[in-house]
Structures are given as C-alpha cells and as structure tokens.
Image (cartoon, rainbow, N blue to C red):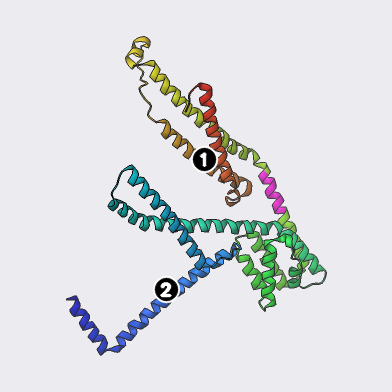
Amino acid sequence: MFKIKSIFKKKADAANPGNSIESFKKKFKQAQQKRLIAQERRQRIKDYIERAGLEISVQKLSKTLFNIAVLINLAISAYLIYYFSVTYGITWGTVAASMIVLWIFVFILLIFALWIIFYLAVDLKIFKRKVDIEDVLPDFLQLTASNINAGMPIDRALWFAVRPRFGVLAKEIETVAKETMSGSDLKTALERFASRYDSRTLKRTVSMINEGVEAGGRIGYLLSRIAVDIQEQKSMMKEMSANVTTYVIFITFASVAAAPLLFALSEILMEVVKNLGATLGSTTKMASSVGIALSFSGTGVSQRDFKIFAVTSLILTSLFSAMMVSTIKRGNIKSGVKYIPIFIVTSLALYFIAEGLAGKLIGVFI
C-alpha cells in the first residue's frame, strides 16, 4: 500500500512540477536556517573564548575535546575488559555488549562533561581578566585625565595612557584605538569593550565618558572624579571585609580543623566500642552481673562506611565553606575558587593525621 502511494506521489510530482519545486525550496530554506544557526553558535563560542584572551579555533577545540573523550573511553574500556575477564571470567559477548553501552552513553556524557569543564575554565579566566581591569582602571583614568588636561583629544589621550603594567586593560584599549583609527565611532568602540565583561564599574565608567563627550563637559575632571570614586569604593570594600574577619575565622576553623578532628575521634570511638563489646562477652553474662541487658554484638555502621561518609562530608563541607568565605570577603564565589583545593586538602590531611595519632595513643591500629 505504501509503495502504491509513493508511486502515485511521484507521478503527481512529475505531472505538477510546481510541487517538487516548492518542496525543494522548503528543504533548501530549512538547510539554510540550520546552517545559520550552526554559524551563530560557533560565533558565540568564538566570542566567548576571545573574552578570555584565548586564541583557539572552534573546530580545533571540538576536535581536541573529542580526542580526549576517545582516549578516556579507551582507557576505561581496557581496564573493564581486563578486570571483568580476570576477576569474574565474563564471556566476550558480555564484554562486547558492555563496550557498546560504554561507547554510546559514557562517551556522550564525557563529551558533555568536557564542554562543561571548558566553559567553567573560560568563565573563570574571563572573571580574572575583569578583576585585573578593575584593579588598574583608576590609574589608567588618572593618566587619561592628565593627557586630556594637557590638550589631547580623548581618543589620543586613551591611546597615550596605555602602559605595559595595565596588562589586559592595555590590550583592550589598543583594540579600541585601532577601531577608532579605522573609522569606527569612539562611543561604539567603548561600548563594545564594556559589553565584553560583566563589570558594573567598567560599564558605568564607559557610560559616563560617553555622556561627558556628548555633553561637551570637562572630560579630564570627570575622569579624575570617576577614578577617585572607584578607589573609594575599593577602600570601602576592604573595610567591610575587615569587619567580617571574625566570621571568616570561625567558618575556616570549623570546617578545616574542628570537623576533621571530630570525625577522626568518632571513628576511633567506634573501634573502641567494637573491641569493648568483643571482650565483655555475651549479653546474658552482663545482665546477670549488672542487672541491665546490654548488647555489644555489633555496630550498625561499619568502619569502612563511616570513613567514606567522613571523607565525603569533609569534601562537601570544605567546598561550601570556601564559597561562604569568598562571598563574605570578596562579595562573590568566583574570587574564592583558589580556596577550595586548599580547604579540601587541609581538612583531609588533618583527618588522616588525627586518625593515625589517635589510633596510636589509644592502642588501636586502624
């Protein structure tokens, strides 16, 4: 029946060529729209990478992540084949089926995870560039104001205020100067520069500069006042950070020092109670001597399970504590990413050290 319908459809298209032309146009439009969407996606990724100051092509990046996922999957496959064949003696058919599942689902998850990790790394790089720009922005504005007061127009004043010590800001201002020299409007170039970074300070500065240029006011004085306001804002943030130092110390001590020691002592206490129950004997003898029926036959949680719980809890506690400390001191989480590995490594190291020392002091070897 389906073949008969397709035959009649082909005959109808041959009899009426307009239908085939319309369908061809429709398919061509759909293909063109998909191509444009793919180009826009590649352009967004390219712009995102350029904001981090990286020069990597999207095609090369996709190929690199694909190759990394293939290598990881190959390593996992080799390990699983060796482990299951040696330990359990599983047949090659089961191994082949497992490899198919691994290369379909795990490979997709690996690609997805690698892209997420890459975006996080690029986002942190962009944030660091934004912080670097905000740190040197007041000095740059002061130099620009001095150049304007000396008689330079604002575009030349921005260009001659560039210094190597300004780092990222120097490169961005050089890009703005090149755009203005090639015929672009200074206002458009500055707004494009400010839109590349999620910085309120930078966007507000650019907006005030553009408004001052349009109004024809004293740009040099305006830039000096903006620089002073930014420096005062930084001083206020440092003062607020100093006022909450007590909270930072308390959170750090509780997560990095107190929690590992308490977990280690709890694990030692579990082992002591277990050994004590083994030496006391059966519950009937205890009931006859004391009058209270107590049972020391076993524990509800094994030592291995408790250690897994302790390590997991310490990692999560250290992670969120580092985020809280960063939010309290800097006002955002991204600034405290460097604290996360320090907190985790320190808490785990103290946990294992305290566990070993307590075991030796009590005479219990774990």
Q: Assign the N terminus to one quadrant of the image.
A: bottom left
> Residue shown at 39%/16% (left/top)?
280
- Tag 1 residue: 317
What x and y, as percent, mark residue 6? Answer: 22, 80
Q: Main secondary structure of the magenta part?
A: helix
Confirm whether the magenta stretch covers residue 239. Answer: yes
* Range covered by the magenta-colored residues: 232-241
Residue type, numbered disc 1: Thr
The first of marks 1 and 2 along the sequence is 2
Q: Quick check: can you spot residue 360?
A: yes
The dot on residue 25 is none
Residue in front for this viewpoint, 70 or 351? 70
Residue in front for this viewpoint, 352 or 315? 352
> Residue shown at 46%/55% (left/top)?
113
Kind of element beneath mark 1: helix
Residue in front for this viewpoint, 227 or 315? 315
The dot on residue 34 is 2
Residue in front for this viewpoint, 349 or 145? 349
Horizontal placement of 256 versus 105: left or right? right
Kind of element beneath mark 2: helix
Residue type, numbered disc 2: Lys
Confirm whether the magenta stretch covers residue 274. Answer: no
> Residue shown at 66%/77% (left/top)?
184
